[in-house]
Image (cartoon, rainbow, N blue to C red):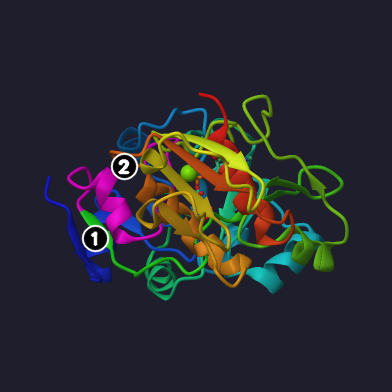
Amino acid sequence: MQTEIGTDLEKVAELLQWGQIVAIPTESVYGLAANALDQEAVIKVFQAKERPFFDPLIIHTHSIEKMKKWVTEVPEVALKLAKKFSPGPITFVLPKKKVIPNLVTSGLPTVAVRIPNHPLTLELLRKLDYPLAAPSANLFGYVSPTSVAHVLDQLGGKIPYVLDGGPCKVGIESTIISFTDEKPVVLRVGGISIEDIEKIAGSVEVNLHSSSNPAAPGQLDSHYKPCKKVILVPEGAEVNQEEPGKTGVIAFRKEWESVPKANQQILSAKGNLAEAARNIFAALRLLDREGIEIMYAEELPEEGLGRAINDRLRRAASKR
Ligand code: TXA
Ligand code: MG
């Protein structure tokens, strides 16, 4: 199949209408989208990503009003958060309406829903009378795509169209927050920091994870896997190398002296966590190449977006 790249929203809407799947830009990462109400189209998403059916999808819509169409209720605190941060990188897990297929939610009684903050995708969503189910547009378990080139690397030839929205401005996935318990529970740290959420919602619980956490079945410990081995180290802790030429380094602010420059990615020379978030997935992809045998990644400060970046690095580093 030939994969077309462009900004033709009419064409994308038509493809979706016919049950095709299309890559779409968001502020967080690129998504692989299908009409969420069309089960055959949703199956194509799982197949193209080689994703297991037990890992539920996020649905995307363009307004809080539309969100209410797909869930049975939006608690007050969720509404406050949505008014503050949507459109934006925050996803709400809420009780689903029957119209959302069980296939989308992997049989869960809840659905994850978000309003992405990208002008092209918002315009597309406004044209549609159904939500778009869209996981990140990468093969299951690999690093999420933050550019059209990343999408094509893994899905080129497998999908008919990539809607070109340029590089992603946030660069890590949305924060997922569930409202099924009395207290909101963060299931995935992401583009909106916990500190910012707590300013609006009061204190929240954080239950990230994992293969053992049935509430977020897709959050496997070993997600975000590059092919190469990743080892986490404290910032600035240059590890002695026997073969520096085969070592990759993802440093937060400063290059390592012992490793060739070409093998290093600096996330933010200024120490800016938002800039580091924009760069992290591209850095992992760039160093996941021939000639590099091992990657060292510096841990970032465990605050704000640093938490979400560290989470991705830990999963990338965890054993298969
Ligand atoms: O930023 C994002 O959220 C991107 C863009 C494309 O919107 N999407 C994304 O989707 O990261 P994905 O499929 O790669 O990750 C979604 C995760 C799933 O792995 C699962 O853990 C969680 O969302 N999830 C989905 N539905 C859920 C539900 N009903 N309850 C708990 N967790 C859910
Ligand atoms: Mg993903």
Q: Is residue 79 above or below residue 30?
A: below
Q: Position of residue 138 (x, y in %)?
A: 37, 44
| In magenta segment, residue 161 | no
Q: State the extent of the magenta-drawn residues as a range.
A: 137-160
What element does badge 1 sit on?
helix
Q: Quadrant of ligand 1?
A: top right
Label 1 within 8 A of ligand 1 by Cβ: no
Residue 194, can we see it?
yes
Residue 137, can we see it?
no
Q: Is residue 121 above or below residue 249?
A: below
Q: Position of residue 183 (x, y in %)?
A: 85, 48
Q: Which mark is residue 289?
A: 2
Identify the residue shown where x is 53% and y is 56%: 172
Which quadrant holds residue 203?
A: bottom right
Q: Amino acid at mark 2?
A: Arg
Residue ID for mark 1? 14
Question: What is the crowding at mark 1: few (fewer than 14 residues within 10 Å), some, or many (at least 20)?
Answer: few
Q: CA distance from mark 2 to mark 1?
A: 37 Å
Please count the marks in the image. 2
Q: Main secondary structure of the magenta part?
A: loop
Residue 140 left/right relative to 152: right
Q: Position of residue 290 (x, y in %)?
A: 28, 39
Q: Amino acid at mark 1?
A: Glu
Question: What is the crowding at mark 2: few (fewer than 14 residues within 10 Å), some, or many (at least 20)?
Answer: some
Which quadrant holds residue 10?
A: bottom left
What element does badge 2 sit on?
loop
| In magenta segment, residue 142 | yes
